[in-house]
Each structure stands twice: as C-alpha cells, then as structure tokens.
Image (spheres, rainbow, N blue to C red):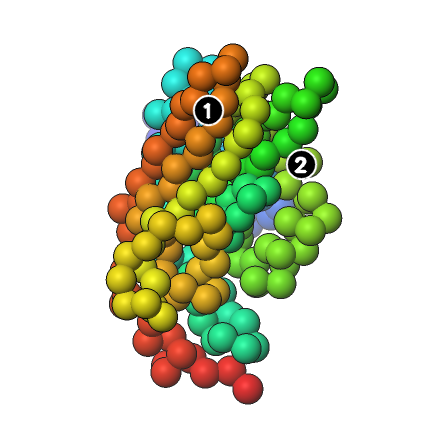
Amino acid sequence: MFFGISRYFHPERPPSKGYTLIEVLVAMAIFGSMLTLGGLALNQGLKQYQGLAEKGINFWTYAKEIGVGKSFHSMIDYYVYTPSDGWVPYFQGGREGISYVSLSPLAGTVPVIVWIRDEKEDAGRRSLVYYELPVYTKTYEEIERDSLFGAFKKSKSVNLLEGVEDIEFAFYGYDLVRGKHTWSGEFDGRKRRVLPSAVVVSYRNQGKQDKLVFGSHVNSFSKTVYNDLYQKQ
C-alpha cells in the first residue's frame, strides 16, 4: 500500500520552471482586455458628446424653444482672460447673434460654447441656427477666432427658426456705467462684467410679429476676485 503511494510522490524531484499554456492564455486575455479598456477610455469623452448630441437633435425636433431655454438656464460664468480687461465672463450678443458658454442639453453636462446665429436663406428669408462645440479650456482669443472663421459650423446644428424675417436681439442686464438694469441691442460680457439676465429674439413670421424670451439663472459675482487672485503679467 505504501509502496503504491510512493509511485505518485517524489519529494526529491525539483519543481518545474516556466508557465503553462493556460497561464499564458490567461495573461494574453488580461492584456487584451486592458488594451480594449484603454482605447474605450481614450475615446469615451468624444463618443459621449456625440451620442448625447444625436439624442439632443431628436429632442430639439419636438421642443426647440424648451431646449434653447434650458441652454440659457444652464449658462455658466465662464471667465476668460483679456490683456486689457483682465478676467471677464464670456458672453457676446449683437445684431448677428449670440455666443456664450453653457451646460447645454445637447451635450449633457459637458460645457460647450453656444452660437445662435441669424443666417440668410433664399428669397430674403432668415433662419435662427443653434451651434455648439465643447469648450474645454479655450481662451478668449480662441473663442473669438472660432467665431470669426466660423469653426462652429463644423459642429452639430439645429434650426430654431426657419423662413422668418427681421430677426432682432435685445438684452436685459446690469449696466455698470449707469448703475442700473437696462435693455440694449448689444451685450458684451467683457465690458459689462456680468451676464445678461434675459434675452429676447423678435422676428416676423408670415406677416405676424412674434418673439422668443429666454432667461439666465446665473450671475455669480464670486469670480470677480480673479483679477486680484490670479493676476497675469
């Protein structure tokens, strides 16, 4: 009996070296999984933005006014640095359109630069078009360059109004010079140091006057200390 058992146990035999086939296959599987996860993580941000934007496009089809209203409501105090004025909140509004930074519904919680532009159609008609691009950490000069060269036109877009006439913008916000809230046809966050409280887009559709009214829920003055805390040379 003891002799039979000794046939299977050889304590004097040295332990085997190297890896078995199963161990090699497991290691290769783990390595392949790590590469896959790394690639997914690398592209996750862009895919998330594009996917949510596509879903947002469908949303805008049924509720454009609600969507742009949410875009205004989620406008954020995105401060940019300018050599002449220091740190200022980014907002540009004038006769051609509006530009601001928002946590837009088209991109979930990804901060984006929004452009709402008055664009020409055929036969003298006009369109109001919404564009957005991820803001990342763009400087004031980079945002202005995107506006000047129309970089936003490479992004997702939605027509808010089509076939209308006489589109005009009006902005309601605090005027530091006058010391009170006023309406104006232009609004520059660089000069005002604040964001507008409300924006009205008026237009004429089939001979009838109509308008869109949007409000902003932000105007935090906490970031005005940037010029004291983060001075640039």
Q: Which residue is mark 1?
A: 56
User: What residue is shown with label 2?
Assistant: 153
Q: Dot 2, how many residues are within 10 Å of its Cα: few (below 14), some (14-19), or many (20+)?
A: some
> Residue at 36% across / 50% down in the picture?
183
Q: Is residue 177 above or below residue 91?
A: below
Cα distance between the residues tagged 2 and 1 = 17 Å
Q: Kindly identify the residue that appears in the image at 54 percent across and 72 percent down.
A: 82
* 76 left or right of 31 in image: left
Residue type for callout 2: Lys
Residue 208 in view in this figure: yes
User: How many tags in the picture?
Assistant: 2
Q: Does residue 23 appear in this view?
A: no
Residue for point 49% across, 75% down: 85
**98 or 83, nearer to the observer:** 98
Residues at circles 2 and 1 in contact by the CB criterion of under 8 Å? no
Check the image and report above or below for 143 versus 214.
below
Determine which quarter of the picture holds residue 71: top left
Helix, strand or loop at label 2? It is helix
